[in-house]
Amino acid sequence: MEEPASGPVETVHALSLYDSPELPDGFAYFPHVNPQAPKGGSMIQTAVGSSFDSTNPFIIRGTPATGIGRIYDTLMASNPGEPFSLYGLVAEGVRLDPDREWIEFDLRPEARFQDGEPLTAYDVVFSFDLLREQGSPFYASYYAGVSQVIAQSEHQVRFEFSDTTSRELPLIVTQLPILPRHYWEPRDFGSPTLAAHPGSGPYKIAEVDPGRRIVYARDENYWGKDLPVNVGRFNIDRVIFDYYRDRDIAWEAFKAGLIDFREDARAATWAIGYDFPAYREGLIERITVPDVNPSLMQAFVFNLQKTKFQDARVREALSLTFDFPWLNTNIFYGAYSRTESYFQNSEMQARGVPSEEELALLEPHREELLDAFHSERLFTDPLPIAEPENLRERLRRALALLHDAGYEIEEGELIHADTGRPLRLEVLMYDAAMERVVQPMLRNMARLGIDTSMRIVNINQYLNRVRDYDYDIVISHYPQSNNPGNEQRDYWTSAAADTPQSRNRMALKSAAVDDLVDHIIRAEDREALDTATRALDRVLRWGFYAIPHYHSGETRIAVWDKFGYPEPFPAYAMDLDAWWVDAEREAELERRR
């Protein structure tokens, strides 16, 4: 491709999705870090699950080790203090075609892998082709708009785009993990491995003990340690993940001082669980970090490949059996709010009735949506969806919906009048921690005559069943940034529903949803993005494809008091990589305990 007639494209140090990057060329370090942060010490965290059997996180086979991404570098690095701005890491300069037909990167000649081999443009091309051809199907979807990647010289690489409408795609490719061609080319990339293979990042694999732990050691010879994006970061010498099969055992390990850092997702523990000597004596610090990204959507997800879930009235009826007010009062100590939106607590969340701009996106799909939802509420009724607070009223409405869908009660069992089949369902999980949330819902379903069960299997069996869509209901998560884009294809689209290991756990296939996802990806400005996400949110919510859970609006952290960290936290991420071990506090902690 030729340069535009107006002249060569300017080489810049940073990119931003909609605005200009905040930090100028030549900045010394990210504003939130402590550039004098000391190096040393260790941080032990928990990884709850049966184990891991692979240090290759990029393939469909195996269970990857927690934290493995820290051994890899990317072309550019994000600033946790900005919503979506990227600054040079492996790339020292970048040129983006004004028509978004291509992007070029000038690579730093000093970049090296951990075995001393140079990192070149040929490694970038190799990594891209390898991930798209042999990696998890996610990568083929994520990079679908890239037509080819070309090494123009040893230190210059060019990505060419078939999709020039996605504003996010040029920024997405900057986050490509770079793998060493010299290491992987002679090896079987598609098979799980426990090898301590080299990356080019700030940490290298130091210890692999499947079933117990994985240890990452800070690479003292890390080629990029003095780059502005890395100054004051990656300070801790050893980052350790200890595996526990049970969350309660992991909690006891933390109280005993065997674990340094934990995110406390259990409301009861946070509310009443810290009455033990180490906390009372000030050896443990609790920190709450307000969420700045949309609150995580966690939900029970229906598998739409199952005929019994294809009627929206059945899905709506089942959603009414989830009694959040009872859970929040009796189990969660009032710590949560009900999640309603897939973009909760953001400007992207749909509220009230559809705006004219939303209707313009929805109207072309009116016939499909009316047929699928058995109602025009999507177009006329406000959000949030009105539901009875009283459980008896909820179950009465649920039973009416099931009758409309063709079910009748026969001898206490809900039977479909046409097929004669009872309504039976199973919730599949790999962790018993959610049992206390699942069981009350299943009891409410049973009151309607539904035959319910819950099955807890080991993580490997769980992953295999999920990959094969061999389940009725699973718990799934849909994290959202403030700038959703290409990842939405993997969450919702028809193509992802036919792809093993995609995040479309619903197996949702909808032309309307596919089109709305395309509008999100093609959005030219913030207003267009917000309109498209609201329309998508509205369709997903009125479709009752999932039973949303709850959120707290903050991240709860407990740590043994030996760490320093930047305050205030950066605006868009906590950035644990900017923490350090305070030697004096660590010594005092050891003396006192």
Image (cartoon, grey):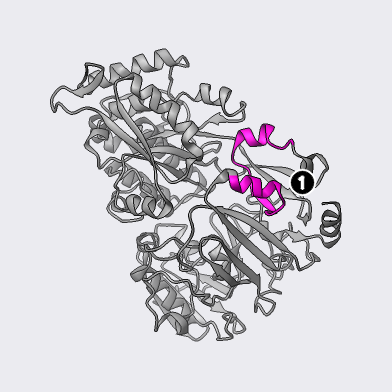
Q: Depth check: 351 or 71 in front?
A: 71
Left or right: where 282 falls relative to 82? right
Mark 1 surroundings: few (<14), some (14-19) or many (≥20) residues within 10 A = many
Q: Would residue 68 be found to the left or right of residue 444 on screen?
A: right
Viewer-proximal residue among 43 and 374: 43
Q: Quadrant of residue 271?
A: top right
Queried whether the magenta region covers residue 152, the answer comes back as no
Residue 463 left/right relative to 418: right
| Secondary structure category for the residue under label 1 | strand
Residue bounds of the magenta highlight: 249-275
Quadrant of the image containing the N terminus: bottom left
Residue 76 screen position, x and y as percent = 57, 68
Q: State whether residue 314 is above or below residue 146.
A: above
Q: Residue at x 41, y 13 (%)?
A: 392
Q: Residue at 28% of width from left, 38% of height from top?
A: 364
Q: Which residue is mark 1?
A: 284
User: Callout 1, which amino acid?
Assistant: Ile
Residue 343 seen in render: no
Q: Is residue 581 above or below residue 403?
A: below
In the rendered image, residue 441, in percent from the top left (x then y), is placed at 42, 27
How many labels, in total? 1
Q: Position of residue 340 (x, y in %)?
A: 48, 31
Q: Is residue 252 magenta?
A: yes
